[in-house]
Image (cartoon, helix red, strand yellow):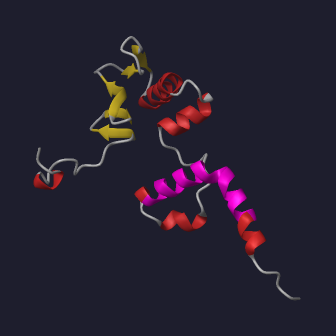
Amino acid sequence: MFPSSAHPGIRTAPIPSGWVQTGERWALWWNAREVAVVAPDGRPDVRLWMQGRKPWQSKSVRAASIAQGKRFAERWCAARLYPHLRLHEAVARLVDATLLYDVPSSATSLPPIERQQVRRLAEAGGPDIARIKQALEARRPLQAH
């Protein structure tokens, strides 16, 4: 096997996530694969194709508009890809909405990758942060007034 540095073209493009538009076609990416496609097909409405985790969890329907198709695809796929979450949270995670997570205001000027890292750390460390703050407060010397 060759080291990955020997092949500079491997994994240079970012892995898509959320909605990605290509021409008139919209694709919803999750876990490095397309799980939904909304595309016009020459009629007044649009064609919608969706896929869940299992091969038999696929669906092809029509929608009145691109926006309606995207909303339907988000909810349908989120219910199948995140069955353990509430629908609102599952849709937010599927489309990578950062509105549900508390991102520090100082992190808004960071590049997208670093913002995502800050958000993930905030999600993972929420309960631990309070415990760490209490431990740090206990270690501080009492200040004289």
Q: Position of residue 25 (x, y in %)?
A: 31, 32
Camera-side residue: 74 or 39? 74
The stretch drawn in magenta includes residue 119: yes
The residue lying furthest to the bottom in this view is 145
Quadrant of the drawing holding the N terminus: top left
The residue lying furthest to the right in this view is 145
Q: Position of residue 139 (x, y in %)?
A: 74, 73
Camera-side residue: 16 or 41? 16
Q: Which residues are magenta?
A: 114-134
When asked about the image quadrant of residue 48, the answer is top left
The secondary structure that dominates the magenta segment is helix
The stretch drawn in magenta includes residue 28: no
- Residue at image location 68% in from the left, 50% down from the top: 127
Quadrant of the drawing holding the C terminus: bottom right
Camera-side residue: 128 or 24? 128
- Using residue 86 as the reference point, say whether residue 44 is left or right of it: left
Total numbered badges shown on the rendered structure: 0
- Using residue 8 as the reference point, say whether residue 100 is left or right of it: right
The residue lying furthest to the top in this view is 56
- Residue at image location 17% in from the left, 51% down from the top: 4
Q: Position of residue 96 (x, y in %)?
A: 48, 43
Camera-side residue: 27 or 13? 13
| Above or below, comparing residue 114 to residue 9 in the picture | below
- Residue at image location 47% in from the left, 25% down from the top: 77
| Above or below, comparing residue 11 to residue 107 in the picture | above
The answer to whether residue 135 of the structure is visible from this angle is yes
- Using residue 23 as the reference point, say whether residue 7 is left or right of it: left
- Residue at image location 56% in from the left, 68% down from the top: 106
The answer to whether residue 45 of the structure is visible from this angle is no
